[in-house]
Image (cartoon, rainbow, N blue to C red):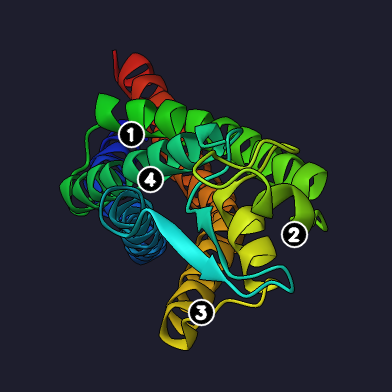
Amino acid sequence: MGIAQYFHRTASAQSAPHSKSTSRNSLFWPLLISNFVLSALSIANLGLISSMVGFLLDQKHNVHSYQVDYEGGPFNLNVEPANLWVDQGHESNGVAGYGFFLGLFGMFVAWRTRKSTRPHKTLTILLILQFLAILFTLSAFIFVFVVTYQTNNQRIRLPVAANNQGVNYAEFKWTPETWFKAVLDLPLIDSDKRDEIDSRVTTMVAWRWMLLPIFIVDIIAFGVTTLAWLKQRKGTTRANSANSIEK
């Protein structure tokens, strides 16, 4: 009876590392792919936001104003309003940067735990960082869409703009997206400039909506990491139990 128990324990001890490794390997690809997609979406959104920032700076420092056709005679409209909200852009930029580096870290953790049979603290760190990413992205998503909704469907009044040449348009508060949408509603004299603004507005809408897939991937990556963390914890508990029985 003692010999049978010995061989049973020996077989269990030999199979435990293999089963634990197989269990973790089953989540290697989901962990790697979800973090890769997060990193890819984030760097793409970072590029879109950077493009918008570059456009705003170019308009401010090089273009200065747009010529508008008006019944009282053409006039120049300053490229920026007096009250321009940009905080939502800064927060979205932070989300994109955080998501990019978090995705890289997640891929590193996935690769590190691929064949390892011992628990890694980096998996716990990744789990915490991904939970924070969900909160960060959700807050940015809500903030951006609320601000956009509050400033949407506003119009630049031609008489007010014509009578205040050389001064930034003072009515209302705007986001870059809603301001340039209102500019497109004006009879701009330069058609090439209109086409450029229209293209940039599309970019602004794109980076705003890109927050949604980033948020979804945040949740997916967090779910996969949670499963990997639970399996790691379960495997550690079993190993400790087996060691205590042998003793």
Which quadrant of the figure has residue 35? bottom left
Q: Give me the C-alpha separation between circle 1 and circle 2.
A: 58 Å
Which quadrant of the figure has residue 85? top right
- Residue type beneath disc 4: Gly
Residue 140 relative to residue 246: left or right? right
Q: In front: mark 4 or mark 2?
A: 2
Label 1 sits on a secondary structure element that is: helix
Q: Position of residue 232 (x, y in %)?
A: 39, 36
Q: Position of residue 153 (x, y in %)?
A: 83, 58
Q: Is tag 4's residue or tag 3's residue first in the polypeptide sequence? A: 4
- Residue type beneath disc 1: Leu
Q: Nearer the viewer, residue 199 or 67?
A: 67
Q: Which residue is mark 2?
A: 158
Q: Which residue is mark 1?
A: 123
Q: Position of residue 72 (x, y in %)?
A: 72, 68
Figure check: 32 above or below 105: below
Q: Give me the C-alpha separation between circle 4 and circle 1.
A: 17 Å
Q: Is tag 1's residue or tag 3's residue first in the polypeptide sequence? A: 1
Q: Is tag 1's residue or tag 2's residue first in the polypeptide sequence? A: 1
Q: Give me the C-alpha separation between circle 2 and circle 3.
A: 17 Å
Q: Is tag 2's residue or tag 3's residue first in the polypeptide sequence? A: 2
- Residue type beneath disc 3: Arg
Residue 180 relative to residue 238: left or right? right
Q: Is tag 4's residue or tag 2's residue first in the polypeptide sequence? A: 4
Mark 3 Cα within 10 Å, few/some/many (few <14, many 20+)? some
